[in-house]
Amino acid sequence: MPTDAKCGLLVGVGVVVAVAVLFFQKDPPAATPPPAAAVRAPAPSGPSDKTIVPPRPASVTTGRGH
């Protein structure tokens, strides 16, 4: 490998490592979750306007001699 290629490789790796170090972000500290008593379930809503679609029947395959 020629000397120019070695120098280019080293400079390229150095640039990639420098960019990675500059833009690396640590994870923010985990927030403590609120106590279970403070979390409220959503209030039940009235009947929805969506139509309930009945399930489709399973496909029936007709075999030979069965």
Image (cartoon, rainbow, N blue to C red):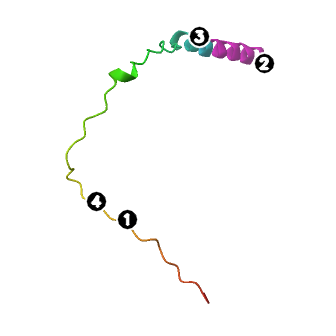
Badge 3 amino acid: Ala
* Nearer the camera: disc 3 or disc 4: 4
Q: Secondary structure at mark 1?
A: loop
Res 32 quadrant in image: top left
Badge 1 amino acid: Pro
Q: Quick check: is 50 in the magenta stretch?
A: no
Q: CA distance from mark 2 to mark 1?
A: 70 Å
What secondary structure is the stretch in magenta mostly built from?
Answer: helix
Q: CA distance from mark 3 to mark 2?
A: 24 Å
Q: Where is 53 relative to 40, above or below?
A: below
Q: Secondary structure at mark 2?
A: loop
Q: CA distance from mark 1 to mark 4?
A: 9 Å
Position in image of residue 5 (x %, y %): 72, 18
Q: Secondary structure at mark 4?
A: loop
Residue that label 4 marks: 52
Q: Earlier in the sequence, mark 2 or mark 1?
A: 2
Residue that label 1 marks: 55
Residue that label 2 marks: 2
Q: Where is 4 relative to 45, above or below?
A: above
Q: What range is drawn magenta here?
A: 2-14
For label 4, the crowd category at 10 Å Cα-Cα, with few meaning under 14, some 14 to 19 and many 20 or more, is: few
Nearest the eye: 28 or 50: 50
Q: Earlier in the sequence, mark 3 or mark 2?
A: 2
Position in image of residue 52 (x %, y %): 28, 59
For label 2, the crowd category at 10 Å Cα-Cα, with few meaning under 14, some 14 to 19 and many 20 or more, is: few
Badge 2 amino acid: Pro
Residue that label 3 marks: 18
Position in image of residue 4 (x %, y %): 72, 15
Q: CA distance from mark 3 to mark 4?
A: 57 Å
- Residue positioned 69% across, 17% down in the render: 9
Quadrant occupied by the N terminus:
top right
* Nearer the camera: disc 3 or disc 1: 1
